[in-house]
């Protein structure tokens, strides 16, 4: 049954990818300029090159044929050259994507680590000053615009107190070879004498963007977990468990926690797209060399191949994470398996 | 020996419009080994009383009682935790919607094992406790008539039928050998064959183990079949209580009388397609309760005196609260 479910999900996933590639493929026709340039990213094309390129992209054949060739190129890793740098786009994506994923992952981690306990406590201490404080703070955090909040914290922590750097991932003093693209991991893997210093510096660079990016998902998590727990506590089975003679903590631990926290997996998937959008803004503010900043600057430069690649990669990541959390939720939650 | 003796239990709900008295000074008396029925329309406060006994009402309810004695011990004098300890040791409850009273994300076996209290496995060495609990849980399943315990054990509540769920919740309820089992409309979600099985099970628990049962239902005919005594509620007021046979034969309160007359099974000489007897009007909402006897506006015998709440009168073991009781001539 599980296998069937997974196959069905993957089948659905393939449709999403077909739709995304169809979209990016058609973009090439809508962009201004030469079709061949849009596809390949090569700015100056001489006649001989034009012949071979047109043949390899099947420009004389039907659109369907062209699309198939396009997908084949994508799969083979030939995503064209960047308009701006004349370097392969896929190489640039490989450098910028991990930076975003790293930032988003830490923000997500922070939101889970802070949001879940606070939400649970708020629900358990229902109608107390603690709950009211947490609710108020989470309402404020929920409605703070990220760019304003970021500027505020930069002013405070970087300019006023001079505690944290304002931009970048790592001070230029340290040179760390890229292996995984995840800075902390790379530093740990790098055979350099200044490992601890570099690590400390990277964490100082990470702190502010992570904090700012985590604000929104944390508040969402607090509200979600609190509501979920309150709902569970009002259920009949909690009353039954109390009537069985279990103590309050036993009821909370055995019945409350699991039922309240299972939907959180699903919630993480739903929040991920918002998180990526916010990550883009945070990256621009902190000059974080991630895919968001890269994509936005590509849009300014009308770097069509890069825009295509960015759209494709971000949508794939979001859809894949969504799918992954949904599958995880189904595996963990017997109630979700009921409908699977 | 009186097991449970409640005097003047009032349950008030705090609403924005003020306190609403949903249950008004109800007495309830259960002897050891007795099966008592608690009958009333939906909304008459039957389930509220049961929940109040179990102590699982949420804190919007104000519970008051003049006496709440359990097994000769006055619980009102004890601290809250002690009350809960005694009640959860001795009283168990099964609910109307069994599948909703089970944790939806925990396998059934785990839930049954959890409901076996620690004092049952006292004296068992700790490395054998898990095994012992499991064996006992299986025995419980067999006792309530589930033969195929292996399938049930690893199932989640949604995978089982309501009938099986109700049997499991009975198994969980009797796991601690309670002195009193409160069954809150245990058969509403079930088919009639399962209903019959369930009543047989309850009756055998009562006869073999001497377990007292408080059976809450709105169906007088099913309650009449297996109970020794019946209490009738209307709108949160106790209208009549007494031994089942006498109460059915000679009801003293007009509401009980109407209730009996509305059941075709109690009317052997009912003609074909004849209208069943029913009181005019319908049960009032909680916001618009009449003062005095709450049946007043619907009562065929109501007079001016009925705006005062009648005192509970006692004749032998028969209690009723009416200014103008029926069947008076037989006594006097």
Image: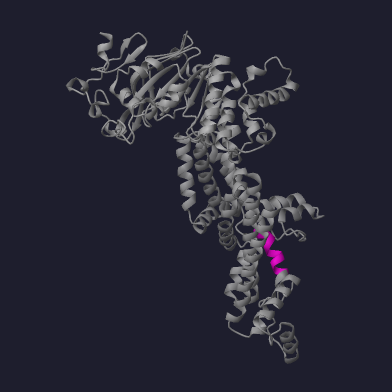
Q: Main secondary structure of the magenta part?
A: helix
Q: Nearer the viewer, residue B159 or A178?
A: B159
Residue A18 versus residue B100 in the image, above or below: below
Q: Nearer the viewer, residue B67 or A210?
A: B67
- Percent position (x, y) of residue B119? 63, 17
Q: How is colour applied across the structure in the image?
A: one colour
Q: Nearer the viewer, residue A160 or A154?
A: A154
Q: Is residue B164 magenta?
A: no
Residue appearing at x 71%, y 82% in the figure:
A57
Write down the quadrant of residue B57 in the picture.
Answer: top left
- Percent position (x, y) of residue A323? 64, 56
Total of numbered circles in the picture?
A: 0
Q: Residue furthest bottom?
A: A47
- Percent position (x, y) of residue B83? 49, 17
Instruction: Tell me if residue A35 can be seen.
Output: yes
- Left or right of A113? Residue B92 is left
Instruction: Tell me if residue A110 can be seen.
Output: no
Q: Nearer the viewer, residue B77 or B29?
A: B29
Write down the quadrant of residue A274 in the picture.
Answer: bottom right
Residue A254 versus residue A216 in the image, above or below: above
Span shown in magenta: A91-100
- Percent position (x, y) of residue B230? 40, 19
Q: Residue furthest right?
A: A191
Residue A111 versus residue A287 in the image, above or below: above
């Amino acid at each position: 049954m599980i296998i069937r479910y997974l196959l069905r999900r993957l089948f659905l996933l393939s449709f999403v990818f077909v739709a995304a590639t169809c979209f990016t493929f058609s973009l090439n026709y809508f962009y201004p300029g030469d079709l061949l340039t849009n596809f390949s990213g090569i700015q100056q094309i001489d006649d001989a090159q034009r012949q071979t390129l047109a043949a390899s992209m099947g420009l004389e054949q039907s659109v369907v044929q062209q699309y198939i060739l396009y997908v084949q190129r994508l799969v083979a890793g030939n995503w064209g050259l960047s308009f701006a740098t004349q370097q392969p786009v896929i190489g640039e994506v490989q450098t910028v994507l991990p930076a975003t994923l790293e930032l988003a992952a830490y923000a997500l981690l922070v939101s889970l680590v802070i949001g879940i306990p606070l939400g649970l406590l708020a629900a358990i201490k229902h109608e107390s000053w603690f709950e009211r404080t947490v609710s108020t703070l989470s309402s404020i955090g929920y409605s703070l615009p990220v760019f304003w909040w970021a500027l505020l914290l930069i002013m405070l922590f970087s300019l006023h107190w001079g505690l944290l750097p304002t931009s970048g991932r790592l001070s230029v003093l340290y040179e760390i070879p890229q292996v995984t693209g995840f800075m902390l991991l790379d530093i740990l893997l790098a055979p350099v004498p200044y490992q601890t210093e570099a690590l400390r510096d990277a964490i100082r660079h990470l702190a502010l963007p992570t904090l700012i990016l985590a604000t929104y998902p944390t508040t969402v998590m607090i509200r979600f977990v609190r509501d979920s727990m309150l709902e569970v506590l009002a259920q009949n089975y909690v009353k039954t468990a109390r009537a069985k003679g279990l103590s309050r903590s036993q009821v909370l631990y055995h019945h409350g926690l699991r039922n309240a926290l299972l939907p959180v997996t699903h919630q993480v998937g739903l929040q991920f797209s918002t998180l990526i959008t916010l990550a883009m803004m945070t990256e621009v503010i902190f000059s974080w060399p991630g895919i968001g900043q890269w994509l936005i600057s590509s849009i300014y430069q009308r770097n069509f191949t890069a825009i295509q690649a960015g759209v494709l990669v971000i949508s794939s990541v979001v859809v894949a994470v969504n799918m992954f959390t949904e599958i995880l939720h189904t595996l963990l939650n017997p109630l979700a398996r009921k409908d699977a | 020996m009186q097991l449970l003796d409640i005097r003047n239990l009032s349950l008030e709900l705090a609403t924005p419009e003020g306190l609403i008295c949903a249950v008004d000074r109800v007495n309830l008396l259960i002897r050891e080994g007795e099966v008592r029925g608690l009958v009333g329309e939906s909304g008459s406060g039957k389930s509220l009383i049961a929940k109040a006994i179990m102590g699982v009402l949420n804190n919007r309810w104000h519970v008051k009682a003049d006496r709440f004695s359990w097994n000769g011990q006055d619980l009102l004098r004890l601290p809250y935790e002690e009350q809960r300890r005694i009640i959860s040791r001795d009283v168990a409850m099964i609910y109307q919607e069994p599948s909703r009273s089970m944790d939806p994300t925990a396998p059934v076996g785990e839930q049954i094992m959890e409901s076996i209290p620690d004092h049952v496995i006292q004296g068992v060495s700790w490395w054998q406790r898990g095994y012992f609990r499991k064996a006992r849980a299986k025995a419980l399943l067999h006792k309530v008539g589930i033969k195929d315990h292996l399938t049930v054990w690893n199932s989640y509540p949604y995978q089982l039928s309501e009938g099986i769920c109700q049997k499991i919740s009975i198994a969980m309820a009797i796991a601690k050998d309670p002195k009193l089992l409160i069954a809150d409309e245990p058969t509403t979600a079930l088919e009639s064959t399962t209903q019959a099985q369930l009543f047989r099970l309850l009756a055998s628990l009562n006869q073999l183990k001497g377990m007292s049962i408080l059976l809450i239902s709105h169906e007088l005919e099913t309650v009449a079949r297996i109970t020794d005594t019946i209490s009738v509620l209307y709108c949160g007021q106790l209208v009549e209580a007494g031994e089942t046979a006498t109460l059915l034969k000679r009801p003293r309160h007009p509401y009980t009388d109407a209730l009996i007359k509305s059941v075709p099974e109690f009317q052997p000489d009912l003609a074909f397609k004849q209208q069943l007897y029913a009181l005019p009007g319908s049960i009032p909402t909680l916001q618009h309760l009449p003062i005095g006897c709450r049946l007043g506006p619907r009562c065929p015998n109501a007079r001016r005196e009925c705006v005062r709440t009648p005192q509970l009168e006692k004749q032998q073991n028969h209690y009723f609260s009416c200014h103008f009781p029926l069947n008076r001539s037989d006594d006097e």
